[in-house]
Amino acid sequence: MNNQGYNPVHPQDCNIVKAMNAIGDKWKLLILREAFYGVRRFADISEDVGISPNILSQRLKELVEDGVLAKVPYQEAGQRRRYEYHLTAQGRDLSTVLVALMQWGEAYFGDPQNPPLRLIHRDTGETVEAALVTANGEKVENLREIEMRFWPERT
């Protein structure tokens, strides 16, 4: 423990590490981006992302094994059965993470005034952003408002 009373979480217990193991490679993030765009078929993902088929196959397999994508069969008339990759509930829950990464990338590496993509609420037309909020929906404006507590409580 350091002099600030901070007792770090061991990496094997850290949920950030676990999440990054599941989705933390460039190819997986690009595959997920495509899935959020509604792209579900292998050939379309491969073409849009510019990924080789063998790497795409491996990453899709891992995302399915981790429960982020579901492999769903389809068959067009006269063709063999193929598969689409649909976001699961677990995968859809990553939307906040991907939006936050997109916002961060725009702010620090892109042109915030002219981003390549804008997220707009269908009904209101307002820009959609990721934000830290309390359980009651209050936006957290400053990280100093957040206190970290280990659970269960540690001594």
Image (spheres, helix red, strand yellow):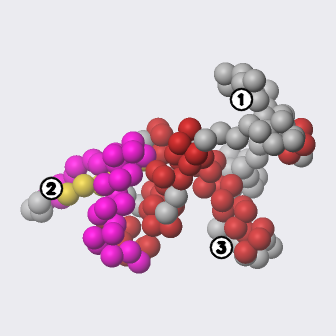
Disc number at residue 150? 1
| Amino acid under disc 2 | Arg
- Crowding at mark 3 (Cα within 10 Å: few <14, some 14-19, many 20+): few
- Residue at figure coordinates x 65%, y 55% from the top left: 99
Q: Which residue is mark 2?
A: 81
Residue 107 visible in the current orientation = yes
Q: Which residue is mark 3?
A: 116
- Residue at figure coordinates x 41%, y 77% from the top left: 50
Which percent across, then down, holds residue 104? 73, 62
What separation in Å lies between label 2 and label 1 (alpha carbons)? 49 Å
Q: Which range of residues does the magenta coloring cover?
A: 50-77
Residue 92 visible in the current orientation = no
Residue 76 included in the magenta stretch of the image: yes
Quarter of the rendering occupied by the C terminus: top right
Write down the quadrant of residue 93 in the picture. top right
Q: Secondary structure at mark 1?
A: loop
Q: Is residue 44 above or below residue 65?
A: below
Tags 2 and 1 touching, CB below 8 Å: no
The total number of labels drawn is: 3
Disc number at residue 56? none
| Amino acid under disc 3 | Pro
Which percent across, then down, holds residue 118? 68, 63
What separation in Å lies between label 2 and label 3 (alpha carbons)? 35 Å
Q: Secondary structure at mark 2?
A: loop
Q: Earlier in the sequence, mark 2 or mark 1?
A: 2
Which percent across, then down, holds residue 59? 36, 60
